[in-house]
Amino acid sequence: MLWSGFTASEDLLPRECQLPAARARRRSWRIRIHIAVLLVLYTGWVGFQVVASLFNTQRESKDAFARYLVWSFSTEGSKALQIAVLLVPRLLVQFLAFFTTASFLGWLLFFKEEPAEFRLKHFLQPEHYPMVDIFLPRYKEPWSLYGPVVQSALDINYPPEKLTVYVLDDGRSDPVKQDLQSLDRSAGSGLVYLQRPNGKGAKAANLNHARQYSSGEVILVLDADFISREDALEVVLPHLLDVDKEGGPGLGQIALVQTPQIFYNRNVLMVRFLDGLLKMTYDLWQPSLSGLGMSQCYGTGYVVQRAAIDSIGGWSTFTPIAEDVPTSMGLQAQGWKLKFLRTTIAEGQCPQTLAELYEQRLRWTAGNAQMLCYLRPFADRRLSVVGRISYTMANYGWCIGMLLWVLVSYVMIGWIVFQFLTKDTSISGVAVSLSQFISVTVTGMAFLLIPGVSLRHKLESMMSFMCYMPIFVVVTAATVAGKLRPGVPGLKLKQSSEAAGSAYFPPLACINIITVVAATGLYAVLVSPGPGLQHLAYNYVVCGSQIFFIWFCNWPAIFALVCVVFGITFKEIPPPIHPKAQPGLHVVVPIQDSCYENPLAIKASAGRKGRT
């Protein structure tokens, strides 16, 4: 079994690491086997449904559900009407549900757990540790949020002569240079202050600016709200090494190691409702990509080799919305490998209100749409076929969700058209509804049976995906209107620091409320029994379960509306205070002794790592 994912075998690892590597390998195979069984059962069910549907179309039946299927395929009435109104949309719903689930399950067959117990000291002596630069980009975050981030970076356990922290300050209206004087510098790590002359190019340009005036072999990137663990580098750097490299472990073809984004306010209700932990992504999707050496960068909590980032000319500036995934694509195109370590090295702050979460996900979804429609990973010849598929799948989730939502709604309207034009009222709306939702229901059951993630987190993930449907609507409309074309002024997007303090109930959430009210009214009408269904209780079960599902998925919007109506507010959780940053423990060092405003001064002293 390949430990590094590419070249090294377990017997080349230090003795302390062989047992953890074996445990991780066994867990990976358990999940793969579980996924394989689930995939076989799911595809078998789909095949059975196809055969059963074809069989049912060959004979008449008094059953309402069968009559509906027969009508869809038969020559009664207008054939063009049947195809346009019911048959094609219904088949598309079933195809999308099957394709999305089957492809996701198929990808999980490559799941690979990286051992969390590895430490850098097991592989290298301290004098051979790589030089590390820590980049802390800032936009408009207040010092109360950003200060603990800088302090935690300075206090990371690492040889101080091999560590430099870079404060990348893009907040020109509110610079933090003077605030740096209050930091505890007793750890001895270098500290460099950089401020660009302008803010063009957003975060990617800020990182590229710092790249010109730093020289570390490895770069750790943390967002302005992520407080790092003291052993962050000891935990993550071993996974950047090639163990079987000639001359001993060292930096090789592994360009980047991404870690999960975990939040210290993760127990806030709205964060939990809307999947602030992204458990499905970090516990299943990313480890599966890592098994193929093509994990994806998510913007914070990752280490990257300078040689790798230099080989592609720096962080991608294709779009100011997102620099992370396009950068990953560039590294993949150059033949570098990317890994994912399912171990937390830093904790950040997740938006706590529905409005802030909507702004964040609107920005993320817009970035996905830009990459899918304009960067076009599916047509990028620099990537392998597997790479094209992975980056396409990573960016089309919003599109699939939007299509399913539209098609299911369209078919329900089609049932009304069917009754109006054929004057056939013998088929209950429950049967029509069931014919659509049966595929989605079974797909949901397959989703809930996926191993490696708790049932609670799966339900939260499902809830968040459906609740964010208004965002998918807005992004789809903006894409069709050409407002997301890179370099063209269009959809107004806010950074996290700008969205902080937004109204508790965003206007977009009105779509959620309208959906709940309309669906509840529709199913209240459908619950009346038709001749094709003999038991009223059956109608109640079918419609009641679907109404419950719609209310469940839109519960965060309903909860936010209730909070606004009754004036309920929640206390914001402040960032944790690092022990060395508490009052009375400061070791004040004049900022000019260790920080530079003039990039030329830094460049001239590159041989001394930017220190005085």
Image (spheres, grey):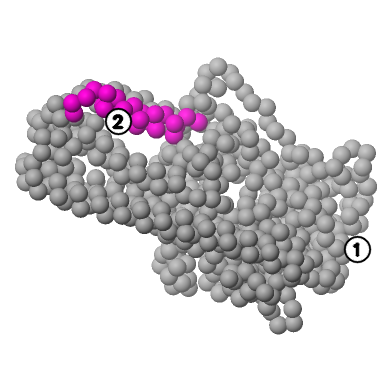
Vertical comparison of 336 with 35: above or below: below
Q: Amino acid at mark 2?
A: Val
Q: Quadrant of residue 193?
A: bottom right
Tell me the residue at 52%/72% (across/down). 333
Vertical comparison of 295 with 244: above or below: above
Numbered tag placed on residue 389 in the rendering: none
Tell me the residue at 58%/61% (across/down). 26
Position in image of residue 366 (x %, y %): 48, 49
In the picture as drawn, the residue positioned furthest to the top comes out as 566
User: Disc 2 designates what residue?
Assistant: 542
Position in image of residue 236 (x %, y %): 70, 60
Q: Mark 2 or mark 1: which comes first in sequence? A: 2
Position in image of residue 569 (x %, y %): 62, 23
Was residue 79 drawn as part of the magenta stretch in this picture?
no
What whole-number distance in Å separates the C-alpha atoms at marks 2 and 1? 73 Å
User: Disc 1 designates what residue?
Assistant: 612
From which residue to which does the magenta span run? 533-556
Vertical comparison of 296 with 92: above or below: below
Assign a secondary structure to mark 1. loop
* Quadrant into which the C terminus falls: bottom right
Assign a secondary structure to mark 2. helix
- Report whether residue 313 is seen: no
Residue 494 is left or right of residue 243, and the answer is left
Q: Amino acid at mark 1?
A: Thr
